[in-house]
Amino acid sequence: MTNIKNPLSLSKIEICVYAPDDEIALNHPGYDIFDGRHDFPLHSAQSGMAVMLIFCNDRKLTEDNACGVRRSVSISIVDLTDGSSIATTNLCVNISRDSYIRLYRVDLPFPGTEINAEHDFEVIVKDKSSGMRLGHMPFHMYDILTFGNDPSTWYNVIRGGIVPGNTKTMYRAIDLLDMSDISVSFALSPAFETSYTSFPELEIRLYAPDGKVRRGFCVPDRLGLEGTEYNAEFHFIGDPCGNGIYYAELLCMEYPVAGFVFRTDNPQSVPGSYTGKEIECLDYTPEAAVQRFSSCVSDTYDTDMPDDGDWFDRALDEFISSGSHPDDDTEDDAGSHQETTAAPTVDCEMPESATAVSLLDKLVGLCAVKERLSVYEKVVTFNKLRENNGFAVSTLPLHAMFLGSPGTGKTTVAKALGIMLKRAGVLSKGHVVVRERANLLGPYYSNEATNTLKAIEEAQGGILLIDEAYQLHRPEDSRDPGKLVIETLLTALSDESKRDWMLVLAGYKDEMQLMFNMNPGFKSRIPDSNIYLFEDFSESELMEIADRYLERKQYVLSTEARVALSRRLNMDYVMRDKSFGNARHVINLIQTEILPAMAVRVMSDSIFDRQSLSEIQASDIPMPVQTLERPRRIGYCA
């Protein structure tokens, strides 16, 4: 809750219990280790609990130039069964006026030798001044001496399958033609005494064809009043744009219990469930998933697939090559910042009457880049005026480096730069040709020089932008063909007779600086003044990008949805890693998660007026999805 006297709210609580030598105990703050679980195995070596808290300054949502917030809060572990307080600590929350959220981690003593696993527990967070409860999180502890040292044996899985829409029928594969609500479902029975008031929590992980991993936690529900079977489900929105082979995995306390493979682009839907060896845990790789699917539905494919003998190889190639790419329909205008790496050429479509900086003014952020580009444009224009009046002109360094993460507008800036240089007479065409390592190396060795020279030829009169250029530099491999591309580029740069082209090397800052420092030829041709740093977008800038995109596409956010989206983007920004996609992340979030969720909700409600078709609700905004590799076991169970 929020009021004028207390603008502080608690957006999220996550906990993790630990022993002294566990990963969470040794790494601070270790935010990436928290995963939203509510249940933990109890062990005598357990010593403490880490609590991650995300606080919000709600003034930022309703006030212009809102001030910061500073409050003292208490965090307590409470035994709900006997009403006792196990541990309490205090925290001073300080959110500056420039921020909306702030993360904290606190640690409390929680020794396993003093915990009764049959009791219920809760973490409670209160504002100390007002006594207001800001949030709470219930959790349970399970004694491994009672349940067994290996949580993977706590449940017996009977069958698994996917359940489309509101039906109750399990399928092994489906033909997904439109966005639909789909459930991954496991039928199981407990392998322990069922006299406990609550069953241990289960986790379902869904490995998608695009490489993302969705996850959710659930407590098994009984199937029928008198039945001995229970059901564990995870719901997700099936998008035909992401069709392919999925792997669904069931885990208990981080230990894999069962898993099955299913497909959403089958020639026809295949009813039925997976049982026996078909639901054994899979050491997941794309190849293993396709092989498992092949063995499970081979009879179906004998009749439904072309009898050419190589359908499996085609399915494998499609699965490995599938991935998440920017939408081709996304414009390079206000707030999109899409960087095109698949298309070889970016046409020069911006009005040539505008200056390069004015072309970028409608874009969010890029303040440092705009300032430096403004200086560069003035120097170019000045030299052109001197040349037109018969004065000598100094040779202007042309080639550049763009340093920054994906989605920060590097290709957009290159387009504007090409237009400006064409208008100034420095370049004859001003178009942009985009290449990366795979394009320049090609499928066979010994073609590196030919492919590189061809790219330079296509870029004559314009700009050759090499994205993720640091991938060409692999000093640990003396035989890597990328060095031949670099040598060809340096040879071309040294040819002063061919100055009607510009080279832009783009990629992550640290990797690009390393390649730059290891290749003196680049350093001599790209001065510091031509190195542009593209910073990550701030929380407010990400929200502005979302607003502009939704406005262009004729969507509106309800008041609650705006709060939910702001919180989601703030959380994504705070938790971002090196691969964070910036504006691309915002656009993908809207296109692949928010709008599909909205479509399913509207179609289910069957209300098709203008407001329903345009207004995004808070329920359409998803919580963050963690991308994991293989299951990471937390704790100390043997």
Image: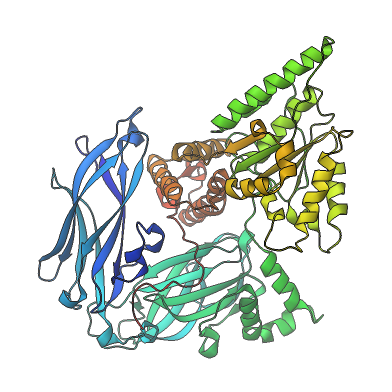
The colour style of the image is rainbow
Q: In the rendered view, does 230 fall on the left or right side of 463? A: left
Which residue reaches farthest top? 389
| Total marks in image | 0
Q: Residue at x 21, y 39 (%)?
A: 6
Q: Position of residue 366 (x, y in %)?
A: 56, 33
Res 296 → quadrant? bottom right
Q: In the rendered view, does 458 fall on the left or right side of 636? A: right
**Quarter placement of the N terminus:** top left
Q: Residue at x 75, y 62 (%)?
A: 480
Query: Eyeballing the image, is 15 above or below 382?
Result: below
Using the rendered image of the protein, determine whether residue 612 is visible from the camera's viewpoint: yes
Q: Position of residue 217 (x, y in %)?
A: 38, 68
Front residue of this view, candidates 473 and 548: 473
Q: Position of residue 228 (x, y in %)?
A: 34, 87
Query: Eyeballing the image, is 107 above or below 11?
Result: below
Front residue of this view, candidates 382 and 170: 382
**Quarter placement of the C terminus:** bottom left
Front residue of this view, candidates 320 and 619: 320
Q: In the rendered view, does 100 fall on the left or right side of 42? A: right
Q: In the rendered view, does 314 fall on the left or right side of 90? A: right
Q: Position of residue 360 (x, y in %)?
A: 62, 29
Q: Residue at x 46, y 73 (%)?
A: 631
Query: Eyeballing the image, is 82 above or below 373?
Result: below
Front residue of this view, candidates 593 and 462: 462
Query: Eyeballing the image, is 531 above or below 72?
Result: above
Using the rendered image of the protein, determine whether residue 555 is visible from the camera's viewpoint: no
